């Protein structure tokens, strides 16, 4: 009986669940949108093989061009122990994909004159007015004043000197404040029984990892930005997102903390062991997280959102459209252009890439060794989610899985490669 159940579960897992009918973007015909149907079919084979070999528990992914979905699928299991197959509307913890939403929220306020890119963060979080940087000297660690104020622009570009508090010089300070190593992987704040601005007020008293504007350091910058959005707008971050982004874009399945009624849609988190096998991740900050149970108070703009592939595709299509989607204008085309233009050059040392006001941007495909057109932008989340927007080819790619840690997983990269390999110009008719 056990073998029969296991076999049935595997068959369900390997079969692509019917094409996304609720992804929020209309379905298109691949051939009319410049794709080879035969080459797109390689994606089904790829995902099925990774599930069959136990290299991923489950995936939801989609590809859209010109605003229409040309390929999508749900593979594997949303919860292996519960024998729950992956569905197109599965909920995923999107972690750092939250940063794009918070960055858009900040730029909404910039457009309205309620924020300025070069104004000091201390205007909204006073503790940053006396920010200090931890440095090493012959006599040991010393805290020195910042040479320039932390700005809104630096929060957007991750050049504010804010890390996740894991460096040896500041680790103990962050641990004592319940941040950094004391907060799971550093970025995790869902277990905090306090509003985000209370957390960020405390962060403002801790030493920075580098002088503002002098290094690209990935960390709490976008969480700070979320608090700035709250204080500049006078509206809690979850409500701001709902009123100004999720509601207008009809993103009905995006929250910091989903309603209890949606618990059955949340995908389980798995971990890749050093031996390369998948095991269910533990409860708490290093695994399943406190998204359905717990305080549900800390709206972390840097890594706190839960969403679906379909909802996030609507958000990305808005950006691709120059700030508008389905009759809802979120930003102006000029603002989207500014947000996605390279804003950090030598400080961001990934070959062929640059960083903008919230995104990684492809500047030289050959140097980066990645498929895509110049100007392609995107980012990823700690649980294994990724997204890409390619304005030149009018492409949106969304890839969702839940694996933390995800040692050695390469499925997202293969997904991107196969999508671009399936992008084929229409065949010319004779005489043209």
Image (tube, helix red, strand yellow):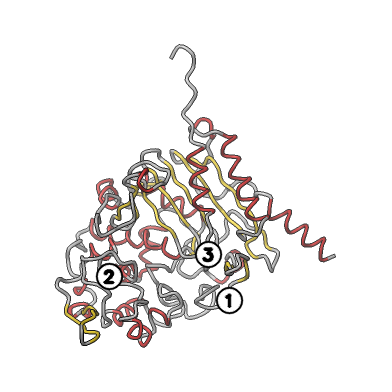
Question: Which residue: 51% across, 80% down?
Answer: 294
Question: Which residue: 37% across, 78% down?
Answer: 195
Near mark 3 (Cα within 10 A), the count class, few <14, some 14-19 or many ≥20, is many
The residue that disc 1 covers is 282
Residue 163 image position (x, y, % from top left): 32, 72
164 or 136: nearer the eye?
136
Disc 3 versus disc 1: distance between alpha carbons?
14 Å
As helix, strand or loop, the secondary structure at mark 3 comes to: loop
256 or 146: nearer the eye?
146
31 or 180: nearer the eye?
180
Q: Earlier in the sequence, mark 1 or mark 2?
A: 2
The residue mark sitting in front, 3 or 1, is: 3
The residue that disc 2 covers is 228
Quadrant into which the N terminus falls: bottom right
Q: Earlier in the sequence, mark 2 or mark 3?
A: 2
Disc 2 versus disc 3: distance between alpha carbons?
32 Å
């Amino acid at each position: 009986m056990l073998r029969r159940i296991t076999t049935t579960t595997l068959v369900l897992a390997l079969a692509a669940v019917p094409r996304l009918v609720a992804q929020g973007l209309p379905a298109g015909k691949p051939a009319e949108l410049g794709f080879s149907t035969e080459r797109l079919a390689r994606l089904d084979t790829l995902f099925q093989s990774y599930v069959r070999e136990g290299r991923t528990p489950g995936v939801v992914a989609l590809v859209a061009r010109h605003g229409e979905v040309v390929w999508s699928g749900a593979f594997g299991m949303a919860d292996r122990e519960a024998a729950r197959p992956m569905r197109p509307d599965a909920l995923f913890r999107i972690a750092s994909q939250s940063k794009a939403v918070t960055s858009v929220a900040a730029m909404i306020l910039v457009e309205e004159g309620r924020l300025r890119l070069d104004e000091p963060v201390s205007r909204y979080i006073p503790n940053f007015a006396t920010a200090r940087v931890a440095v090493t000297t012959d006599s040991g660690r010393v805290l020195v004043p910042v040479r320039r104020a932390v700005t809104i622009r630096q929060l957007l570009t991750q050049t504010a000197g804010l890390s996740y508090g894991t460096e040896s010089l500041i680790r103990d300070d962050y641990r004592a404040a319940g941040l950094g190593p004391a907060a799971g992987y550093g970025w995790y704040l869902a277990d905090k029984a306090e509003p985000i601005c209370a957390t960020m007020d405390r962060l403002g008293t801790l030493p920075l990892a580098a002088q503002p504007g002098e290094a690209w350091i990935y960390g709490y910058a976008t969480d700070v930005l979320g608090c700035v959005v709250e204080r500049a707008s006078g509206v809690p971050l979850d409500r701001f997102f709902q009123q100004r982004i999720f509601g207008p874009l009809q993103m009905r399945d995006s929250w910091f903390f989903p309603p209890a009624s949606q618990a059955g849609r949340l995908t389980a988190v798995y971990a890749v062991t050093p031996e390369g096998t998948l095991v269910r991740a533990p409860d708490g900050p290093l695994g399943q997280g406190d998204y359905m149970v717990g305080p549900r108070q800390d709206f972390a703009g840097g890594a706190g959102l839960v969403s679906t592939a379909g909802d996030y595709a609507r958000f990305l299509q808005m950006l691709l459209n120059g700030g508008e989607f389905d009759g809802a204008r979120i930003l102006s085309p000029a603002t989207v252009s500014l947000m996605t233009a390279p804003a950090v050059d030598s400080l961001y040392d990934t070959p062929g890439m640059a960083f903008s006001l919230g995104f990684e941007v492809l500047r030289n495909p050959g140097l980066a060794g990645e498929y895509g057109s110049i100007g392609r932008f995107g980012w990823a989340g700690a649980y294994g989610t990724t997204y890409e927007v390619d304005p030149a080819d009018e492409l949106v790619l969304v890839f969702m899985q839940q694996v933390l840690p995800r040692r050695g997983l390469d499925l997202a990269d293969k997904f991107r490669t196969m999508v671009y390999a399936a992008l084929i110009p229409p065949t010319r008719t004779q005489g043209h």
